[in-house]
């Protein structure tokens, strides 16, 4: 039977996993900026 070759290549980094790890910081910041912009627009129109 054939002997399987050992692979020495490292597992490539998944770009999605790098983005997912930043989501807990990005979402609250984006939400805060969005709330500030909406409040600024509301005050400007009033």
Image: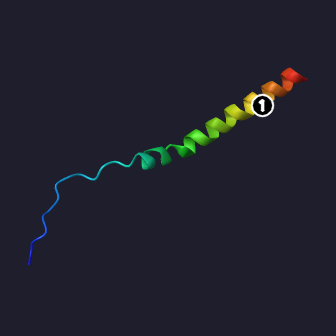
- From the viewer's perspective, tell me whether residue 9 is left or right of residue 18: left
- From the viewer's perspective, tell me whether residue 6 is left or right of residue 20: left
> Residue placed at 68% from the left, 38% from the top?
31
> Residue placed at 14% from the left, 62% from the top?
6
Mark 1 is surrounded, within 10 Å at the Cα level, by few (under 14), some (14 to 19) or many (20 or more) other residues, namely few
Q: Residue furthest top?
A: 44
Q: How many marks?
A: 1
Mark 1 — residue? 38
> Residue placed at 20% from the left, 52% from the top?
9
Q: Residue furthest front?
A: 1
Q: Position of residue 11 (x, y in %)?
A: 28, 53
Q: Position of residue 26 (x, y in %)?
A: 57, 39
Q: Position of residue 19 (x, y in %)?
A: 47, 44
> Residue placed at 43% from the left, 45% from the top?
18
Which element type, helix, strand or loop, lies under badge 1? helix
Q: Residue furthest bottom?
A: 1
Colour scheme employed for the rendering of this structure: rainbow
**Which part of the image, by quadrant, shows the N terminus?**
bottom left
User: Image quadrant of residue 25?
Assistant: top right
- From the viewer's perspective, tell me whether residue 22 is left or right of residue 41: left
- From the viewer's perspective, tell me whether residue 11 is left or right of residue 30: left
- Vertically, is 37 above or below 25? above
User: Image quadrant of residue 37?
Assistant: top right
**Which part of the image, by quadrant, shows the C terminus?**
top right
């Amino acid at each position: 039977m054939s002997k399987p070759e050992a692979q020495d290549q490292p597992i490539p980094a998944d770009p999605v996993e790098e983005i997912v790890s930043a989501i807990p910081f990005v979402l609250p910041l984006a939400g805060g900026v969005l709330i500030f912009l909406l409040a600024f627009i509301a005050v400007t129109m009033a």
